[in-house]
Each structure stands twice: as structure tokens, then as C-alpha cells.
Image: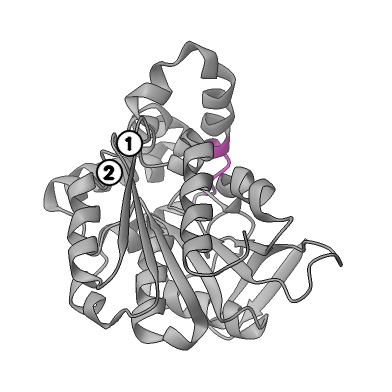
Amino acid sequence: MSLFTSPTGVDLYYEIHEPGSSVANPETIVFSHGLLWSGRMFAHQVAAFKNRYRVVTYDHRGQGQSSSPDSGYDMDTVFADGVALLEGLQLGPCHFAGLSMGGFVGMRLASRRPDLLRSLILLETSADPEPEENRTKYMLLNTVVRWFGIWAVVNPVMKIMFSRTFLRDPARIDERKQWKDELRTNRPTITKAVDGVISRKGVYGELAAISCPTLIIVGDEDVATPPAKAYRIHRQITGSLLMRIPKAGHSSSIEEPAAINAAIRQFLVGIGAAA
């Protein structure tokens, strides 16, 4: 178990997968997960890229195997956690891939600390505050979790996190059970992380400052951050690329890993990274 003790007051769990001695001076890809999950949601990406890159995953405060401080769940503090990790482990400049909440971190990194990034990959994310209709729904779910525990909201959360295609596919019953079980591992402190996400400030005004190569990925069936959110980011980041993934929802790294890996690989090769 690897823990990085951040000056922001949290122990962040991380994993580093090295490509081996056959790859000299490997470039680094850092994967930053979405709300309610952990670095495990990138297992397919780790497997696909670890032979050519140094691949890093980490868990946000209060999630996965990271510690749960009493405060500091706003997105600027979570961003500061990311900065501390990249600096403390000397990971930059890296390719930073953030999904949903991880994308909130990634956009802040690219606009505020461009020295730490070589490129930015955004998956299923938004540059805006949480829409009011979502805030009301998510606050209600969060209240249920406070009273009864995470198990009480697993089914409605699955409908937010995954596409209809994934949820209805009879061949993926075991995968759905795996991720339901993963949701149930969340600690009671997850409500603080949820509060931080649904009360976040938007960063749309900062996007024009992003100058590193940027890939934006969105699933056709994402109901949490629909494709329109991705197009809005794309229009604001000069030179960015946008890719839509059929049959994917808000957890595209899990739902359509082959398509996600192909998109990331094509992007990295296009900017001169390792094949």
C-alpha cells in the first residue's frame, strides 16, 4: 500500500505501474477517477498502457483507500491534493487523464499549473457548476446515504453512472454486480465528497488559458454530463479534439474500455508520445 502524505492534510493512496527496463525514460500518464469510485475504475487503461508508459492512479480524499479528513472536500482543495501528489512524486510534466471529478482536477491543473502537464485528457466531465435539477436530486440521494448508508441508493446511482446499454446487457451481469459491490465499499464520509462535487464552482472562464494538447471524450449515453457539456468544453479550448464513444455512459473507462484505450492511444501518438 503506497500513501503520499500531502501538505494539504491527507494521505493519498496511489499506485505506480512501471513499464520495465526495456523502456528508457518512460512518459507518465496519471489517471484521476470520478466521484464514488477509485483508481480501480482505470484497471483496463492500466493494463493497456503500462508496457509503454509509467501509469499512475490515485484516490481522492475520502474515497478509495485515501484518508478521510474532516474538511477540505471543495474542488480547489482536491485540486491542491493533485498538485501536491504530482510535485511530491515528481510525476510532471505528465499526461493527465481525469474522468468526471478527475476532470474537474485536470482542467484546474491545465489552466493554473501548465508546467505539470504535457497533455490533458478529459472524460465525461463538465466545466460548469452542477445544474440545479441535478443538485436537488443528488442532495436527496446524499441525505438518504447519511440516514441509511450507501446501500440504499446503489440502484439509482447505477442508472446515473452507467449507460442503458451497459445496464441492459445480459452478458455483463457479473460486471454490474462487481461495480454495485464497489459502490457499497464507500465509507460514510463519502457524503462530504458528494457535497464538494455538487457545490463546486465552474471553471469555464479558465478554459481559454489551457494551451496543452487536449482530448475530450464523452459517451453517447452519458446522462450525468451529457455530450453537450463536452462540446462546450471543446469550443473553449483552442485546438482540442473531441471524441464521442457509442454505447458509453458516465463510466466509459469501464463500459467501453477498448474504445477508450484506442482514443487515448491515437491522441498520444498524434502529439508525439510513445506508440
Residue 167 is situated, as x and y percent measured from the top left of the image, at 41, 22
- Name the kind of residue labelled 2 in the image: Ala
In the picture as drawn, the residue positioned furthest to the left comes out as 132
Quarter of the image that includes the N terminus:
bottom right
Kindly identify the residue that appears in the image at 60 percent across and 62 percent down: 58
Q: Name the residue beneath numbered marker 1.
A: 160
Q: Name the residue beneath numbered marker 2.
A: 224
Give the camera-side residue of 50 and 160: 50
Classify 10 Å Cα crowding around label 1: few (below 14), some (14-19), many (20 and above). some
Residue 252 is situated, as x and y percent measured from the top left of the image, at 43, 41
Q: CA distance from mark 2 to mark 1?
A: 6 Å
Q: Secondary structure at mark 2?
A: loop
Above or below residue 152? Residue 235 is below
Residue 275 is situated, as x and y percent measured from the top left of the image, at 62, 58
Above or below residue 254? Residue 105 is below
Kindly identify the residue that appears in the image at 59 percent across and 53 percent down: 39
Above or below residue 170? Residue 121 is below
- Residue 50 in which image quadrant: bottom right
Above or below residue 4? Residue 64 is above
Q: Left or right of 268: which side holds 109?
A: left
Q: Secondary structure at mark 1?
A: helix
Asked if one can make out residue 266 in the rendered structure from this viewpoint, the answer is: yes
Classify 10 Å Cα crowding around label 2: few (below 14), some (14-19), many (20 and above). many
Q: Is residue 242 covered in magenta?
A: no
Find out whether the residues at labels 2 and 1 contact each other: C-beta distance under 8 Å: yes
- Name the kind of residue labelled 1 in the image: Ile
Q: Give the magenta-colored segment's residue range.
A: 182-187
- Residue 200 in which image quadrant: bottom left
Residue 111 is situated, as x and y percent measured from the top left of the image, at 33, 81
